[in-house]
Image (cartoon, helix red, strand yellow):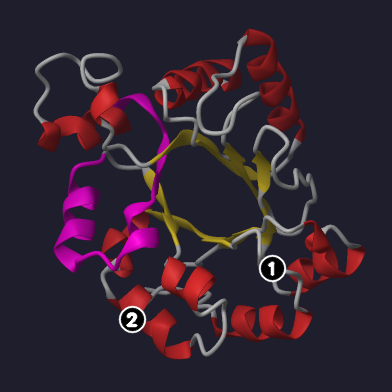
Amino acid sequence: MVERRVGVSGWTYPPWRGDFYPKGLPQREELAYAASRLTSIEINGSFYALQKPESYRRWRDQTPDGFVFAVKGSRFITHMKRLGDAKEPLERFFGSGVWELGDRLGPILWQLPASFEYDEERLATFFDLLPRTSPEGARVRHALEFRSPTFETRRAYDLLRRHDIACVLADTAGRWPKVDEDTSDFRYVRLHGDTELYASGYDDRALDRWAATIKRWPKDTYVYFDNDAKGHAPHDAERLIARLR
């Protein structure tokens, strides 16, 4: 059965308090509240720094059965190492506690900087290092969000298909490539803002269009709103969830 999961990128945003989060809700209860309203959340703290196993366990325990997290890969790997010499950094990243999510673990997102131009050999070497199963034997999915137009080629899409990596469909208000390319058995969408990057919300017509697009895909889909600067993300996610029911 096809699963369509919709959520937000991160959940700890002070402006959401008293808006999406009820006034007076303790911060320690924000994840549980968000998980009760959304169907997935993208962990973005893992991009900035290695997290702790106890953090992943706590997040797992604060969410209901059936809930799924996406995990954003370390920027040390994507931005500093630029995918090179990645074997040990990957081991440290996954060994930091990612596996503690257990059945709550969804796709791993790898976001490249706009300065990273398409390099087939470097990408292929990195993809070959990625874990494809968890220690318990569950499948691990991976998605790539690129921001250089040099990736907009048939060779790049074919490389992603050969390595079973989902091509992220990113809506960035025209700043970076917006590529709707099917390269795995699931789809991954990041909505960074309809008209203003990270800031603008999605009106009813825009959400109707996204819902229609997603419904046409006969495969699991993960959608994350990253237009959090003005608090639109969680509300837009709820409205899209309603349209996909």
Residue plotted at (54% across, 19% down): 201
Q: Which mark is residue 92?
A: 2
| Residue 234 appears anywhere in the view | yes
The crowding category of the residue bearing disc 1, from other C-alpha atoms within 10 Å (few below 14, some 14 to 19, many at least 20), is some
The quadrant where residue 222 appears: top right
Q: Nearer the viewer, residue 73 or 174?
A: 174
Residue at numbered disc 1: 164
Q: Residues within 10 Å of mark 2 (few under 14, many from 20)?
A: few
Q: Name the quadrant containing residue 138.
A: bottom left
Q: Secondary structure at mark 1?
A: loop
Q: Are marks 1 and 2 in contact (CB under 8 Å)?
A: no
Q: Position of residue 72 (x, y in %)?
A: 44, 58
Say if 127 sits above or below 29 in the image.
below
| Relative horizontal placement of residue 118, taking residue 236 as reference (left or right) | right
Circle 2: residue type: Arg
Is 50 inside the magenta-drawn segment?
A: yes
Magenta stretch in the rendered image: 36-63
In-front residue for pair 44/98: 44
Sequence order check: which comes first, mark 1 or mark 2?
Answer: 2
Q: Residue at x 56, y 39 (%)?
A: 3
Residue 213, numbered label: none
